[in-house]
Image (cartoon, rainbow, N blue to C red):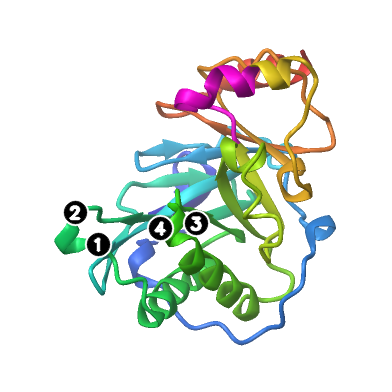
Amino acid sequence: MIQTTERSSAAIALILIGGLFSACGSRGIRNRTKEMKLPPVILWAWERPEDLRFLNSGRYGVAVLAQTVVLNGNDVIHKPRRQPLLVPPDGKVVAVTRIETQRSKDQRPTLSVEQTNRVSELIRKTLHLPNVSAIQVDFDATTSERRFYRDLLIDLRSKLPDETPLSITALASFCIGDRWIKDLPIDEAIPMAFRMGTDSVKIRSMLAEGSDFRGELCRRSYGIALDEPLNASFNSDRRVYVFNSRSWKEADLKMIEERLSQ
């Protein structure tokens, strides 16, 4: 559910994400990174109730988990967002689709053309949700799933309107050595510089020493978490996406600004 409101008592729209889907027309593939008209700081809003009416829409946008898509065998299981989201009436929203795959032997996805087409269709339909001005895909693709992911993004880019930004989240390891994403038809690959597991020490040291992520697509934004200091400076020309393990509060914005000013 997404609501845009002018004041706490007045709801302009209340929409269940699963009910507004319709098709998009065909478009050519091209990269328009410089045309991404999004605020400099984007808050990720995951599957929980969120009231973000306190945001200054010129400074902050919202990347909302619009749906989760699970690939199981040759099936595509669609799980639309169920939790409400309140944003300012002029707020910029990025519709995020999370893709997950079953790992058990008898449920491994076929990664078929039919699955590619179905997932692409579901993602394109999120563009019709309130205030949405960009599309984002969150998929921790394994090596064997990369061909499917590439084909999916190519199909998405060809069918989304030319002016619609398309971004993906990227494991930080993809942006320091593994360069398989370097020529994807997207506008940015957001390095997830948090919850990095075994790569954490290496990447934190790299950033603290002033080194940068490799590849142009990984040098357009940062992905950070409110509860994990990076001990690194931020390039002011790049957009910052911020993850929060709990619901957002207005006081959290002060923490973000302090982090970015370091």
In the rendered structure, are the residues bearing label 2 and label 4 in contact, judged by CB atoms less than 8 Å apart?
no
Main SS of residues in magenta: helix
Residue placed under numbered mark 3 in the picture: 12
Measuring from the top left, give residue 220's x and y in whole percent.
76, 44
Amino acid found under the numbered disc labelled 4: Leu
Which dot, 1 or 4, sits closer to the camera? 1
Q: Quadrant of residue 150?
A: bottom right
**Closest to the observer, 116 or 242:** 116
In the rendered structure, are the residues bearing label 1 and label 2 in contact, judged by CB atoms less than 8 Å apart?
yes
Residue placed under numbered mark 1 in the picture: 108
Amino acid found under the numbered disc labelled 3: Ile
Q: Quadrant of residue 163?
A: bottom right
Density class for disc 2 (Cα within 10 Å; few <14, some 14-19, many ≥20) is: few
Query: Which residue appears at 49% of the width and 83% of the height?
Result: 23
The disc at residue 104 is 2
Residue 125 located left or right of residue 169: left
Residue placed under numbered mark 4 in the picture: 14
Q: Tell me the element at label 3.
A: loop
> Which callout, 3 or 1, points at the residue further toward the start of the chain?
3
- Please determine whether, in this image, residue 180 is positioned above or below residue 45: below
Q: In the displayed image of the protein, which residue is found farthest to the bottom?
A: 26
> Which callout, 2 or 4, points at the residue further toward the start of the chain?
4
Which dot, 2 or 4, sits closer to the camera? 2
